[in-house]
């Protein structure tokens, strides 16, 4: 676009050329001026509305205020509804936790007074009041109360789970599963006639009849503390289960674990044989507590 300027003060006419960029810049400046002007007028009207004697203006301001109040109330109602739904969910969760906790406590044999599910936890302290603001404050207090109850139930269930886990670990660390298939014994624990001397002697374990090569499994998890040939027990494996418990597997034809190896409950550790002081193929199984022999049947009958 070309603009020609003609004036008596000018010796000759001048021409101004406006490009698209110039037009865009002018349009932007005009829009910015219009926005600033509208904002200023709006500020002045609201600021000095009480001094302007105009019913239409006052009516417009009242309607504007009412619309803002309605939006605020609608927002508060939506939040209250959402909080009420959340409170209902928390209460339902609390009820399920109470039911689960009571059932677990009964199954584990814990005394009822140790875990009082369904009763509020013991609390105390000085009273510090907070200004209330209607139903929102009341709902917040209920949510806080239920949250504290959930934390209490969570702590109790966590403690209960730890106790049950410790109990399960102790049971799994006891030599309580039969080390070979079949339960027929050729010789039990206690006094008997020794098969080699014919004299009365104390038998410190249990002999399981089994064919040579039958897998021998660990009666519980632990660490191998002996895996070697013994003059009397032949090929023998000993597994330390912790808490001063050791299980012994003797007269094996083959040992499959090494000293210091960690074995799992039910893991194959040897094969049945007739090595050492033995009259035939069988497994001699012992359980020792603090080095003293125990009757293996007391542990093999224990629940796993």
Image: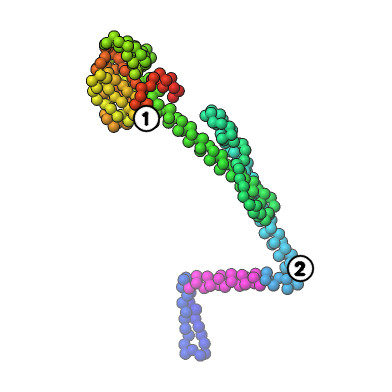
User: Which residue is identified by label 1?
Assistant: 244
Q: Is residue 36 magenta?
A: yes
- Element type at mark 1: loop
Which portion, as a residue range, is magenta? 22-44
- Residue at image x 42%, y 20%? 298
Residue 215 bears which disc, if any? Answer: none
Of label 2 and label 1, which has the lower sequence position? 2
In this orientation, does residue 214 appear? Answer: no
Q: Nearer the viewer, residue 290 or 51?
A: 290
Q: Is residue 232 left or right of residue 54?
A: left
- Residue 104 locus on image (x, y percent): 54, 31
Judge the density around disc 2: few (<14), some (14-19), many (≥20) Cα neighbours within 10 Å. Answer: few
Q: Secondary structure at mark 2?
A: helix
Of 28 and 4, the residue lying toward us: 28
- Main secondary structure found in the magenta portion: helix
Nearest the eye: 271 or 291: 291
How many other residues sit within 10 Å of disc 1, few (<14), some (14-19) or many (≥20)? few
Relative to residue 265, is residue 230 drawn left or right? Answer: left
Mark 2 = which residue?
55
């Amino acid at each position: 676009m070309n603009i020609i300027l003609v004036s008596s003060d000018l010796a000759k006419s001048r021409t101004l050329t406006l490009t698209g960029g110039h037009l865009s810049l002018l349009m932007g400046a005009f829009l910015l001026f219009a926005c600033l002007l509208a904002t200023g007028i709006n500020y002045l009207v609201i600021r000095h509305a009480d001094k302007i004697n105009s019913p239409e203006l006052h009516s417009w301001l009242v309607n504007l205020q009412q619309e803002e109040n309605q939006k605020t109330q609608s927002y508060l109602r939506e939040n209250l509804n959402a909080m009420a739904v959340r409170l209902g969910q928390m209460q339902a969760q609390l009820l399920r936790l109470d039911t689960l906790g009571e059932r677990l406590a009964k199954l584990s044999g814990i005394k009822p007074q140790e875990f009082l599910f369904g009763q509020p936890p013991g609390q105390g302290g000085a009273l510090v009041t907070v200004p209330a603001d209607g139903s929102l404050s009341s709902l917040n207090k209920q949510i806080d109360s239920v949250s504290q109850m959930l934390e209490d139930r969570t702590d109790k269930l966590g403690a209960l789970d730890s106790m049950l886990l410790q109990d399960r670990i102790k049971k799994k660390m006891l030599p309580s599963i039969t080390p070979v298939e079949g339960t027929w014994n050729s010789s039990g624990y206690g006094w008997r006639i020794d098969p080699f001397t014919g004299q009365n002697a104390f038998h410190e374990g249990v002999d399981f009849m089994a064919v040579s090569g039958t897998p021998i499994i660990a009666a519980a998890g632990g660490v191998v503390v002996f895996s070697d040939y013994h003059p009397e027990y032949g090929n023998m494996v000993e597994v330390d289960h912790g808490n001063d418990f050791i299980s012994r597997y003797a007269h094996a034809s083959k040992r499959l674990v090494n000293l210091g190896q960690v074995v799992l409950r039910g893991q194959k550790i040897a094969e049945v044989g007739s090595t050492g002081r033995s009259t035939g193929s069988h497994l001699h199984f012992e359980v020792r507590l603090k080095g003293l022999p125990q009757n293996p049947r007391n542990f093999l009958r224990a629940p796993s």
